[in-house]
Amino acid sequence: MSLLRVEDLHVEVDGKPILAGIDLAVDAGEVHAIMGPNGSGKSTLANVLAGRPGYDVIRGSVTVDGEDVGTLSPEERSLRGLFLAFQYPIEIPGVSNMEFLKAAVDAHALARGEEPPSAVDFVKRARVAAMRLQFDPDFLKRGVNDGFSGGEKKRNEILQMLILEPRLAVLDETDSGLDIDALQIVADGINAFRANSNAVVLVTHYQRLLNYVVPDHVHVLAGGRIVHSGDRGLALELEERGYGWLDD
């Protein structure tokens, strides 16, 4: 059974068709890259997987670990192990990263019927994750994304992923706007997360992130459909030739 299975997914936004029949199966232990030109529906797919409001599923299904999550709220999907790293992370002034992450970890533990970690244990865990992403530990005291640079916001998304340890991480253009140093830090965080028990769906325009996070499968989304799939070699071919040849 696939960790994530998307079948015949058709989605509209404000009455406009965006996705026109997506089929995708992602097994535990795999990294899938979703590539494609602007306006192809990549971010729509990521947001629909997470249950973001404003996207109307006309037909099809999304299942996680065999459970149809189509009617679940974003919060309920999160508690079932689905994580979305935003393309444009929002700021939450007045709420520190530490408070935000502890509340999230506690909610996930309670949903699994487990005892939440103690404050001491959680602080140790958070500091280890922050240092992996080259954040000063005092960063955890700052408001969530409040006054952060673009690169800090993207690294903070990966920090959240490492601490929450989801079953399925959907990363929506986490590499956009990053310089080479920040890109490598983000890639290191993603690779540290990879395990046989979880899976990653990477949404990206370019293959440069895939130099550091090697995907098991690459899919090209165009016109609301997956029009081509392959291994990492497909991403390299797209980098060299663009997307036009797929219409040949």
Image (spheres, rainbow, N blue to C red):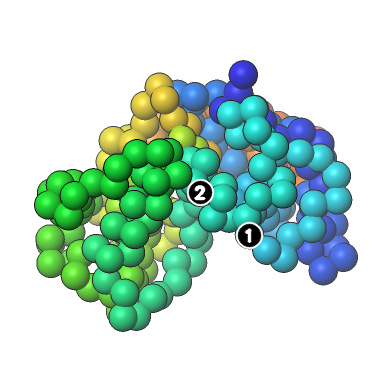
| Depth check, front residue: 45 or 224 | 45
Residue neighbourhood size for the residue with mark 1, other residues' Cα within 10 Å, grouped as few (<14), some (14–19), many (≥20): some
Circle 2: element type: helix
Q: Which residue is rendered at x = 18% and y = 59% of the image?
A: 135
Asked if residue 101 shows in the view, the reply is yes
Residue 148 placed where, x, y %? 30, 73
Q: Which residue is rendered at x = 37% and y = 55% of the image?
A: 104
Of circles 1 and 2, the one toward us is 2
**Which quadrant is home to the C terminus?**
top right
Circle 2: residue type: Ser
**Which quadrant is home to the N terminus?**
top right
Residue 40 placed where, x, y %? 71, 52
Distance of mark 1 from mark 2, alpha carbons? 11 Å
Q: Which residue is rendered at x = 19% and y = 70% of the image?
A: 141
Q: Which residue is mark 2?
A: 78
Residue 66, quarter of picture: top right
Q: Which residue is mark 1?
A: 52
Circle 1: residue type: Arg
| Depth check, front residue: 99 or 158 | 99
Residue 29 placed where, x, y %? 45, 24
